[in-house]
């Protein structure tokens, strides 16, 4: 009986820890992520099964659920856009999101190819600044 209770307690603790580490499941104030963004224009289908549309306000993120709306702010010029996650990536180290060509154009990062950005998930409060 005690062994079963310990197993149940350990299982519950692991499930709670996994939920806390999941980006989408964190409290609103932790819904902010900073890093580098890049843009891509690929043909074919996205990981969600949609046809890739470079004119849509969409993006790829490693963990956020498909359909999640994310505010992406270019920290060098203050421009921002809201994108919908419909793909997986980026697969290049140091990057947190890949945005569509249309989103990159609005962010002012077409020529540079990348930009330092702040991601805010589902209207979460922006607490603190991104590190320099």
Image: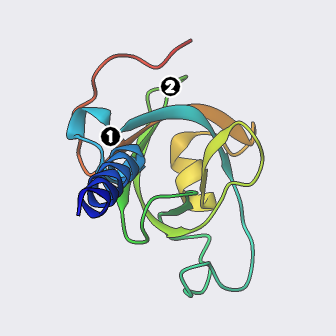
Q: Which label number is shown at residue 113?
A: none
Q: Can residue 91 be seen in this snapshot?
A: yes
Residue position marked by numbered label 2 in the rendering? 75
Residue 27's spot in the image, x, y percent? 23, 40
Q: Write the residue at 75% across / 36% down.
A: 112
Q: In this view, does 106 lie above or below 65?
A: above
Figure colour scheme: rainbow
User: 15 or 55: which is nearer to us?
Assistant: 15
For the C terminus, which image quadrant? Answer: top right
Residue 97's spot in the image, x, y percent? 58, 49
Secondary-structure class at tag 1: loop
Q: Which label number is shown at residue 31?
A: 1
User: 105 or 23: which is nearer to us?
Assistant: 23
User: 11 or 70: which is nearer to us?
Assistant: 11
Mark 2 or mark 1: whose residue is earlier in sequence: 1
Numbered disc in front, either 2 or 1? 1
Seen in the image, is 36 located left or right of residue 12?
right
User: 89 or 58: which is nearer to us?
Assistant: 89
Residue 74's spot in the image, x, y percent? 51, 33
Q: Write the residue at 44% across / 27% down.
A: 78
Q: Can residue 117 be seen in this snapshot?
A: no
């Amino acid at each position: 009986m005690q062994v079963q209770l310990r197993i149940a307690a350990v299982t519950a603790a692991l499930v709670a820890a996994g939920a806390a580490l999941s980006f989408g499941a964190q409290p609103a104030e932790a819904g902010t992520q900073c890093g580098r963004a890049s843009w891509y224009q690929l043909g074919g289908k996205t990981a969600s099964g949609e046809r890739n549309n470079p004119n849509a306000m969409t993006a790829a993120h490693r963990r956020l659920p498909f359909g999640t709306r994310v505010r992406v702010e270019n920290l060098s010029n203050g421009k921002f856009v809201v994108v919908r996650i419909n793909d997986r990536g980026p697969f290049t180290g140091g990057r947190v999101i890949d945005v569509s060509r249309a989103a990159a154009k609005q962010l002012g990062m077409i020529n540079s190819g990348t930009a330092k950005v702040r991601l805010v998930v589902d209207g979460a409060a922006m607490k603190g600044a991104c590190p320099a």
